Image: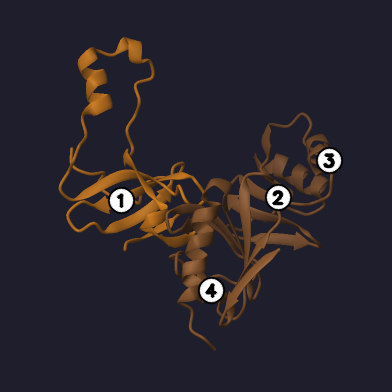
Chain colours: A orange, B brown
């Protein structure tokens, strides 16, 4: 079982308490009506899906209930770090494949 | 109160008590604590209690308040008047179990994947977690007394799992 550190509970918890919440660090277009259909479609549906480091949202659903961000390596499943949504990613994190 | 025990652990089904979920920012939390007569604990996964009332940290802006006095909700509402907050009476929502005895942690670990040793989960610690497949709230009130609560619709499920775990407890 994976142990994931929740940055709000400040403790490591078993993965059973968590849910995956999709890709992180996406910027929603400020006015969706002004972007092209292609750009909006890409925002909604096109994932980076990298092989390696990936910024992800996770939710501590059976805990404090909060969403947070995690840097996970999609090859090894190693979660390198987690941080609160209003914090910056770790300095050495490359943000995942483009 | 119904109690079932085996070996060095016992399960007591408790009557419903007054329970409220409060959510709010720092100022509202201070006001809520003043109205409640008990400061809401700031450290994560921690509780404070005085007499038979208690406040349990559930999230960075969320606490479970336990108090049986009639009128608690009105007192809290008055203390929070004019402030942004959420206050919900969840007294009828939960099934409460007290898990007691020297092997209480061993019994709970049949369905809870946390370190419940005195180092990992000391007296006063509280958390939401999973009890097998059910969401649960766990609070270590005393060294050998844990309070477990699950949603009422999961009460029968939790009770049967606790019975099953009790049957496999070692005899002293």
Question: Badges 1 and 2: C-beta atoms under 8 Å apart?
Answer: no
- Of tags 4 and 1, the one toward the viewer is 4
**Which residue is drawn at the image coordinates 38% and 15% (left, top)?**
A31
Dot 2 or dot 4: first in sequence order is: 2
| Mark 2 neighbour class, 10 Å CA radius: few under 14, some 14 to 19, many 20 or more | many
Residue B78, can we see it? yes
Whole-angstrom CA distance, mark 2 to mark 4, is: 24 Å
Residue found at x 67% / y 44%: B92
Label 4, label 3: how far apart the Cα atoms are: 36 Å
Assess disc 4: are there few (<14), some (14-19) or many (≥20) residues with their C-alpha within 10 Å of its C-alpha.
many
User: Which residue is tagged 1?
Assistant: A71
Chain assignment, label 2: B
In the rendered structure, the answer to whether residue B142 lies left or right of residue B68 reads left
Residue B147 image position (x, y, % from top left): 63, 63
The answer to which quarter of the image holds residue A37 is top left
Which label's residue is closer to the chain start, 2 or 3? Answer: 2
Tell me the distance, in whole angstroms, between the alpha carbons under discs 3 and 1.
44 Å
B94 or B138: nearer the viewer: B94
Q: Which mark is residue B65?
A: 2
**Mark sitting on residue B105:** 4
Task: Identify the chain of the residue marked 1, using the numbered disc in the image.
Answer: A
Left-right relation of B166 to A71:
right
Q: Secondary structure at mark 3?
A: helix
Q: Disc 4, disc 3: CB below 8 Å?
A: no
């Amino acid at each position: 079982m994976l142990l994931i550190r929740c940055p709000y509970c400040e403790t490591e918890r078993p993965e059973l308490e968590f849910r995956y919440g999709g890709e992180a660090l996406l910027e929603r277009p400020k006015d969706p009506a002004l972007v092209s259909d292609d750009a909006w479609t890409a925002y909604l549906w096109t994932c980076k899906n990298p092989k390696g480091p990936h910024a992800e949202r996770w939710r501590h659903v059976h805990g404090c209930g909060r969403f947070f961000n995690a840097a996970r390596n999609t090859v090894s499943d190693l979660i390198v770090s987690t941080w609160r949504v209003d914090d910056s990613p770790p300095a050495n994190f490359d943000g995942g494949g483009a | 109160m119904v109690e079932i025990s085996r070996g060095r652990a016992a399960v007591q089904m408790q009557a419903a008590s007054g329970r409220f979920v409060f959510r709010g920012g720092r100022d509202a939390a201070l006001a809520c604590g003043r109205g409640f007569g008990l400061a809401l604990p700031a450290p994560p996964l921690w509780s404070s209690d005085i007499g038979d009332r208690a406040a349990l940290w559930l999230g960075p802006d969320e606490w479970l308040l336990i108090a049986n006095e009639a009128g608690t909700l009105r007192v809290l509402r008055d203390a929070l008047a004019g402030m942004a907050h959420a206050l919900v009476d969840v007294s009828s929502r939960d099934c409460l179990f007290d898990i007691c005895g020297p092997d209480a942690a061993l019994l709970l670990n049949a369905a809870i994947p946390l370190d419940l040793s005195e180092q990992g989960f000391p007296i006063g610690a509280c958390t939401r977690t999973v009890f097998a497949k059910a969401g649960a709230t766990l609070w270590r009130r005393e060294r050998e007394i844990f309070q477990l609560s699950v949603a009422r619709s999961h009460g029968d499920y939790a009770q049967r799992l606790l019975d099953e775990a009790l049957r496999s407890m070692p005899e002293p």
